Structures are given as C-alpha cells and as structure tokens.
Image (cartoon, rainbow, N blue to C red):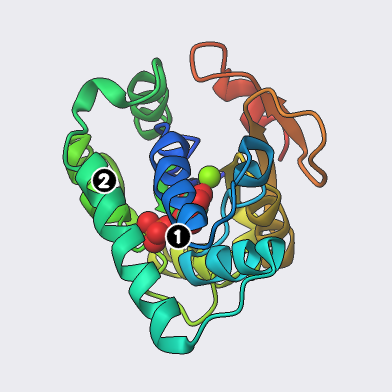
C-alpha cells in the first residue's frame, strides 16, 4: 500500500488558534467564578465547543441551566470570532504551505479534518481555501473527535479508503479519532505525553515527506 492522502487537523497543526480559545474560555471561567489554567486549556485541544464547556463546568463545579449554557457558548464564540477576524495569512505555521505543495506535486491528496465549526472561516482568513482537495469541519458530522466521523468523511470526500489516509494531529482527541478511523497518525508539536501516534514532527520546517511515505 502507498500513502494516498494527508488529512491535517487545523487548530494547532496549520495555525495557532489555541491562544484565542484560551482567552475566550478564560472569560467563560470568570463568568463561573473559576480560573481556567493553561494546563486545563491544553486538555480542550481537539475537543468540540459544547464538550469543552461541559469539561469547564465539571472542573469548576458550577451548575447552570441549558439556556445559560447556550448563552455562554454563543458569547464565547463571538469573542473567539473577534480574534479570528484579525487573523492573516502570515499566521500559517512556517513551512506548511511548502510541505503541502510538495505533497500535492507528488500526487498525494490533501484535506483538513477539524472539530471546529469555524474551520472554513479560519482557512479563508489564512488564504488557504484553494490549498486542499477537501475540508471537513465540526458542523458536518454528528460526532466530533475523539470519534472518527470527521476523518472518515474526509476520506469519503477524497474517495479513498481510511487506511490510505494519514492524519496529522496535535491533540489526544485527534489521535484517538484517527485510530478509530483506521488511519495512521503523526503527532505535530513537542508534546510528549500523547498516545497513539506513529511518528512525531516538531514543526513543518523539519517535516520530511519521505518519512510520511515510509509509514506505508
Ligand atoms: C478544535 C480545537 O479544533 O475545535 C478546540 O482544538 C475547539 O479547542 C474545537 O474547542 C471547536 O472549535 P469551535 O471553533 O467550533 O469552537
Ligand atoms: Mg488541533
């Protein structure tokens, strides 16, 4: 078998949006009279919006109504979108565009598989809409990561079998989703405590496409 496609996660793999999520979730924490730590924010990586609020509620011990939950989610997202709207193409991680271009020039399909319902807006701000053969976001599937739905839909859109697709992820939820989808995965970034990846790369500047291919 050979590598036919790379499916990239977006947040934390193509660009750094975690800092914007953190500021917005910290605001939510404050509304609950709770201080969200950076370590806790790391645990929200790859986790859907609603599921993230559920975790914060659990950590804080706060009890609120469904209507209050919905209101917090809306306001969190409004705040997050104000950050997103300031984003520009120079926020794409260095070396990503070159890597992606090389993969495509070798006939490898490329897609984004993100839990974020804002993925297309972010990709547009980064001027990358035309860089991929398929984009799947958190609004397109019933279940978010760590369930495999997002990656399976990306493979379907590319008309490929899951086992022909390689996922690049920065979160445990994403690595678990890839495994459940029957796809190999590469961990992006310097995190040491995550499980299930077949390889790790520090950044796109040091990524070697041949090493990706050698996993197949
Ligand atoms: C993931 C992020 O990509 O998307 C999570 O890593 C985020 O932190 C999730 O909660 C959902 O994002 P959004 O943009 O729909 O709130
Ligand atoms: Mg991510």
- 150 left or right of 89? right
Residue 208, image x, y percentages: 58, 18
Q: Residue 72: which numbered mark, if any?
A: none
Front position in the image: 176 or 153: 176
Residue 182 appears in the rendering: no
The percent position of residue 168, horizontal first and vertical second, equals 58, 41
Q: Position of residue 16 (x, y in %)?
A: 42, 32
Q: In the picture shown, does residue 179 fall above or below 71?
A: above
Circle 2 residue: 122
Q: Residue at x 42, y 50 (%)?
A: 27
In this rendering, the answer to whether 159 lies above or below 97 is below
Residue 90 visible in the picture: yes
Which is more toward the observer, 158 or 17? 17
Judging depth in this view, the residue of 20 and 58 nearest the camera is: 58
Q: Is residue 73 left or right of residue 43?
A: left
Question: For mark 2, does the 10 Å Cα neighbourhood hold few (<14), some (14 to 19), or many (20 or more) residues?
Answer: many
Furthest-bottom residue in this view? 66
- Does the residue tagged 2 have its C-beta within 8 Å of any atom of ligand 1? yes
Which residue occupies the foreground of this view, 96 or 92? 92
Q: Classify residue 71 by image quadrant.
A: bottom left
Residue where numbered disc 1 is placed: 31
Q: Position of residue 10 (x, y in %)?
A: 43, 44
Q: Quadrant of residue 158?
A: bottom left
- Compare marks 2 and 1 and give the one earlier in the sequence: 1
Q: Tag 1: Cα neighbours inside 10 Å, few (<14), some, or many (≥20)?
A: few
Check the image and report above or below for 181 versus 101.
Answer: below
- Identify the element where label 2 is drawn: helix
Name the quarter where the C terminus is drawn: top right
Q: Residue at x 63, y 19 (%)?
A: 202
Q: Judge depth for marks 2 and 1 and give the one in front.
A: 1
Task: Look at 50% across and 20% down and name the residue there.
Answer: 204
Give SS at disc 1: helix
């Amino acid at each position: 078998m050979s590598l036919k496609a790379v499916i990239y996660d977006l947040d934390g793999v193509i660009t750094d949006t975690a800092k914007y999520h953190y500021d917005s979730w910290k605001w939510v924490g404050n509304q609950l009279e709770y201080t969200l730590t950076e370590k806790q924010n790391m645990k929200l990586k790859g986790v859907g919006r609603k599921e993230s609020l559920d975790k914060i509620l659990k950590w804080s011990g706060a009890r609120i109504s469904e209507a209050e939950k919905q209101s917090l989610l809306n306001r969190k997202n409004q705040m997050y979108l104000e950050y997103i709207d300031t984003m520009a193409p120079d926020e794409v991680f260095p070396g990503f565009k070159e890597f992606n271009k090389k993969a495509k020039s070798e006939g490898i399909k490329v897609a984004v598989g993100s839990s974020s319902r804002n993925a297309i807006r972010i990709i547009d701000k980064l001027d990358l809409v035309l860089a991929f053969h398929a984009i799947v976001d958190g609004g397109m599937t019933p279940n978010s990561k760590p369930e495999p739905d997002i990656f399976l839909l990306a493979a379907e859109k590319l008309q490929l079998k899951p086992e022909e697709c390689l996922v690049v992820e920065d979160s445990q939820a994403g690595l678990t989703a890839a495994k459940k989808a029957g796809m190999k995965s590469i961990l992006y970034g310097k995190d040491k405590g995550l499980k299930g990846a077949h390889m790790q790369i520090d950044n796109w500047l040091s990524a070697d496409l041949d090493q990706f291919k050698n996993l197949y």
